[in-house]
Image (cartoon, grey):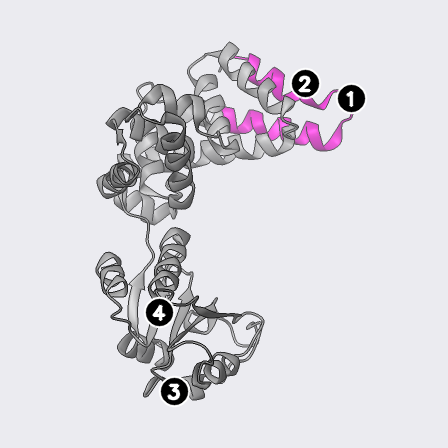
Amino acid sequence: MITQAWQHIKKGNFAPVYLIVGEESYFVDETIKRLKAALSTQEEAEVMTFDLNEQPIDYVIDEADTIPFFTERKLIIAKNASFLKATEKGKEKIEHDVKRLENWLQNPTDTAITVFIAPYEKLDERKKVTKLMKEKCEILLAQTPQNNDLNVWIQNEANQHGKVIANEAIGKLLEMVGPNMLQLQMEIEKMALYLGEDSEITIDLVEDLVAKTLEHDAFKMLNAYLEHQQEEALRIYHDLLRQKEEPIKLVGLLANNIRTMNHIFYLQKKGYHQQQIAKQLKIHPYRVQIISGQRNRPSEQRLLQALYSLAEVDLQLKTTGGNRERHLELFLMKKL
């Protein structure tokens, strides 16, 4: 587990080569931060960063094999290790000497800590270099915790700031921010600073302080519309227009949310569980949970009718001039 690796890093027990696999950037950033802190106990860490989409693997190996001048060990970060995932021949941005890397992995230098970052959902397990890296490197999985594990992580983050957070507040925070752990971390820190000596992060505080995302506002607008709350849907829409959001972009977000809802409801009817639905649709399980838990679930017919109406709005926005804001406004005013 990644937390165990962090404990070893804190104690100064380093692996010569790490491979971080996954799309959750919080774990990537946190691991790098902890490595830098552990290497900087007496002097500032010597850090070199390479982007393997732009630079060949030779640069990383040459740097790792060069003895550091001012420190016992240096830290080398190799981002975007795309040669570990499946790619079509000739589609690679840069050609890497993978054979040289395979040889180097057999006996990596002990004067450098090399971190390869593969920010992808999965690697190509058929490749020899992937198998070898999984054998020779310490593997850290950068995956967003699921459901209750994410709630526990949020509670722990609040505790680190000397605060507690109620379950309802966690639910509202996830609804507004989504499962983006870096964003969640920043929002928790902001609320903790605002509270000062007070200790509880409440649902009201979350609603007042957390920055609303466009996706969250679009989802709220759609829900209000589907629940026949035309005034609320229009209020959100006018707020977004004041923030200079384009109607055609909002139409796209609304349509995307409707399609996602339709897929989720269909798969639920087929007996799929939330985790299975999330995997099938390639979305986060928390999004499935939010949509599945709706009290007044719209029928498939209403969703398809709304999607058809949005397609008409999209066409109007692309082919007519005049008051562009009015087309989506009229859609939101009509009850399905």
Q: Dot 4: few (<14), some (14–19), or many (≥20) neighbours within 10 Å? A: many
Query: At 39% from the left edge and 30% from the top edge, which residue is drawn?
Result: 191
Start-end of magenta stretch: 306-335
Q: Quadrant of residue 100?
A: bottom left
Q: Quadrant of residue 16?
A: bottom left
Q: Dot 3: few (<14), some (14–19), or many (≥20) neighbours within 10 Å? A: some
Which numbered disc, 4 or 2, marks the residue closer to the eye?
4
Query: Residue 89's spot in the image, x, y percent?
Result: 53, 76
Question: Left or right: where does residue 268 sit relative to residue 59?
Answer: left
Residue tagged 4: 19
Numbered mark located on residue 59 in the image: none
Residue tagged 3: 104
Question: Gap between marks 4 and 2, in whole Å?
Answer: 52 Å
123, above or below 133, in the image: above
Q: Secondary structure at mark 1?
A: loop
- Asked whether disc 1 touches disc 2, contact meaning CB atoms under 8 Å apart, the reply is yes
Question: Gap between marks 3 and 4, in whole Å?
Answer: 15 Å
Q: Secondary structure at mark 2?
A: helix
Of labels 3 and 4, earlier in sequence is 4
Numbered mark located on residue 326 in the image: 2
Callout 1 amino acid: Gly
Question: Gap between marks 3 and 1, in whole Å?
Answer: 64 Å
Question: Which of these two is toward me, 183 or 276?
Answer: 183
Query: Residue 2's spot in the image, x, y percent?
Result: 26, 59
Numbered mark located on residue 322 in the image: 1
295, above or below 99, in the image: above
Q: Quadrant of residue 152?
A: top left
Of labels 1 and 4, earlier in sequence is 4
Question: Which of these two is toward me, 78 or 41?
Answer: 41
